[in-house]
Amino acid sequence: MQHTSSKGLATCAICGAGETQPGTFPMVVGVGRVCMNDGMAKVRCESCGTEVKLITSAKLQGRTLCLSDYMRELEKFRQHIVQAFDEKAEPAPKILERAYSEAPQGYTLLAVRRGRNSTHVWEAEYEKTEIFQMRCS
């Protein structure tokens, strides 16, 4: 949920009611600015099934989601992921093995390298497999 930063009056994306003062209609991701009457209406999360208020939900690819499921789904769309491993906790060969075997589902390991300005941290960089394959073909 976000509040408007514009000086103009917004209209509700659901019922079409207009604001009386700028910034009173909250923004619902994927829906738009909504009045408080419509914002307080209950909706069901299409992922986990919990019932939440519209202003504490978001729409992603046409699905209504609670904020925790929205953040989880949003993570799936990230193209690059970097994971850090500490050489003080395990040796470098073990880190390399773990970086490859414990790659996030749907991602391809691109590189394992020293962390910036570090003598003991290693970083494993992953890219979405579909994007990696498009770049390589």
Image (cartoon, rainbow, N blue to C red):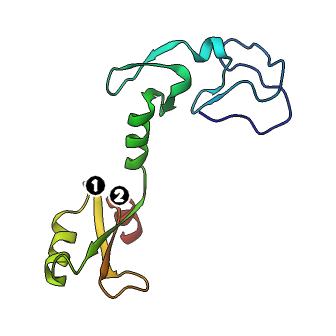
**Residue sitting at 42 percent across and 59 percent down?**
79
**Residue sitting at 15 percent across and 74 percent down?**
97
Circle 2 packing at 10 Å, graded few (<14), some (14-19), many (20+), is: few
Instruction: Give how far across and how far down residue 87 sits, in percent.
Output: 23, 80
* Picture quadrant of residue 137: bottom left
- For the N terminus, the quadrant is top right
Residue with the mark numbered 2: 130
Q: Secondary structure at mark 2?
A: helix
Judge from the rendering whether residue 28 lies leftward or rightward of residue 51; answer left or right.
Answer: right
Circle 1 packing at 10 Å, graded few (<14), some (14-19), many (20+), is: few
Residue with the mark numbered 1: 106
Q: Secondary structure at mark 1?
A: loop
* Picture quadrant of residue 105: bottom left
**Residue sitting at 43 percent across and 28 percent down?**
65
Amino acid at the residue labelled 2: Glu
Mark 2 to mark 1 CA distance (whole Å): 8 Å
Indicate whether 76 appears above or below 122.
above
Residue lying farthest front?
88
Contact flag, marks 2 and 1 (Cβ < 8 Å): yes
Total marks in image: 2
N-terminal-most mark, 2 or 1: 1
Instruction: Give how far across and how far down residue 133 sits, in percent.
Output: 34, 64
Judge from the rendering whether residue 36 lies leftward or rightward of residue 97; answer left or right.
Answer: right
Judge from the rendering whether residue 44 lies leftward or rightward of residue 59; answer left or right.
Answer: left
Instruction: Give how far across and how far down residue 80 sits, in percent.
Output: 41, 63
Indicate whether 47 appears above or below 81.
above
**Residue sitting at 50 percent across and 30 percent down?**
59
